[in-house]
Amino acid sequence: MLASDDMKEQTLGLCPADSAAHLPVMAPLYFENPHSSTAGFMDFDILKTTFYHTLTLCLPHALGTKLRESSDPGTPFLVTIDQSSELPLVIKHIDDTCTIAEMRRSGFMPHVQPEVILREASKLVRNPMGGDPLVTLDIVYMKDGVGVLLVISHAIVDMAAYCRFVLEWGLVAKAGSLPRDMDTDRKRFWDLVSGLATPVPTVFENHMAELNAADVEVPLEHPQASTIFRLSADAAAMGKLACTRDTMCPGISLPNFISALLWRITALACPNAKYAYFSSSLTIRNDPRFAEYWGNTSTFKFIYAPRDKVIEDVGRVADWVQDSVREFTVAEFAHILSLYTVDGRWYDRSLSKYVGAAGVPRLSVMNISRIPFYDIDFGWGRPTKVMYQTVGIPGLCFFMPQTGDGGIEVFVCLREDAANALLADELVSSHFDVEEIPTAK
């Protein structure tokens, strides 16, 4: 049972930043079937039933159907959870002619599309205040395995909480156990974060006046398509890359070194730009006060530098990247989130202008390499592959979960000029296998 009759409806508070998180969180999981028969493998009824059960106990606000503003300044948004209404969308696809390899190349696009395709469903998981659904689930049964793609609004979870939810769902499906008690008190989280905040002007906030005054949008002679690349390196290649890193900038982590290489490439591709921009998705979940909170504890931190400086010295650029990560604090996190609710979401509008500028070199990095996606098990074994859901946003870069073999996998989307610069870069070609991935349409 999902809920008793006297527990059909409840109201929870959302912290101010929840309403500003409009992007979906998703990570396709592929489970290879080791048997010749597909009967009983990743049973749909078991997965669907245990998904609803886990969702109700762990993330009840994901069942929200009505969002409204509150008169209480401390809780500006409330979500009313009506569990007697229709539950989140769960889609079942059967395509016994498609293989996991083909599905991965297509960006999780089933060939057979019954009533709704996942690509359209994922587009719906955007803005809870706009009435969009908060969750969709797509399960695809293929010739040699099963693909699972859960899409959750970023207003509910960050990537770490997303993974922990799927881990709990796996335990419920595998062992029939009840999920652990999880901290979903969003009002308490916001009060605690706000109490730790001090005015910490961010680099990006300080730069806004200069950004607005500068001619940041350099007209292009023709529209440019974007290309998604998969950069991969096995353990041996990673050892070679580490030696190169030690020569150029000792003490820099490999993800930050790779980020610096890619940021420099985006700057090389925009010779007329005045500045180059970098952002990284950072979390306060490492702080023990927030480690168990099942919500969004991540935000983007922006830095910028003169474009000519970014193309000169990879080592110096790597120092800038690592310093921006090292110096991230709870106070800065709270200060950035507070900008979402000031002056009609001034920060949101500023970021939209920044992302939309055609001639601006930028790289936005999300590193989920240490999140334990490969520990997920619904009772039929762990996933053979966790993939990136291809989204054609130029400058977006993902460091994928590690499988334990010592290798690394990075996805990056680049406009045409930056794509050409990537393919011509000797450091990239000598350390990575580079593969072009179909862009989502």
Image (cartoon, rainbow, N blue to C red):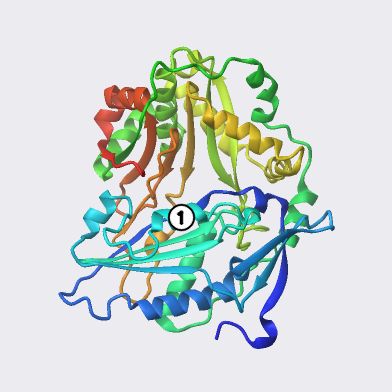
Expressed as whole percent of the image width and height from the top left, the position of residue 63 reads: 59, 69
Looking at the rendered image, the quarter that the C terminus falls into is top left
Please name the residue shown 38% across and 37% down the image. 412
- Residue 312 vertical position relative to residue 162 in the rendered view, above or below: above
Expressed as whole percent of the image width and height from the top left, the position of residue 298 reads: 59, 48
Foreground residue among 394 and 337: 394
Element at label 1: helix
Q: Which of the 4 quarters of the picture holds residue 81?
A: bottom right
Please name the residue shown 36% across and 22% down the image. 417
Foreground residue among 401 and 205: 205
Q: Which of the 4 quarters of the picture holds residue 415?
A: top left
Which residue carries the number 1 mark? Answer: 122
Please name the residue shown 30% across and 29% down the image. 428
Is residue 338 at least partly visible in the picture?
yes
Is residue 26 at least partly visible in the picture?
no
Expressed as whole percent of the image width and height from the top left, the position of residue 432 reads: 27, 35
Is 206 on the left-hand or right-hand side of 106?
right
Is 63 on the left-hand or right-hand side of 222?
right
Foreground residue among 54 and 440: 440
- Residue 245 vertical position relative to residue 435 in the rendered view, above or below: above
Residue extending farthest to the left is 36
Q: In the rendered structure, which amino acid carries the disc numbered 1?
A: Ser
Q: Residues within 10 Å of mark 1 (few under 14, many from 20)?
A: many
- Residue 39 vertical position relative to residue 411 in the rendered view, above or below: below
Please name the residue shown 72% across and 55% down the image. 15
Total numbered labels placed on residues in the image: 1
Looking at the rendered image, the quarter that the N terminus falls into is bottom right
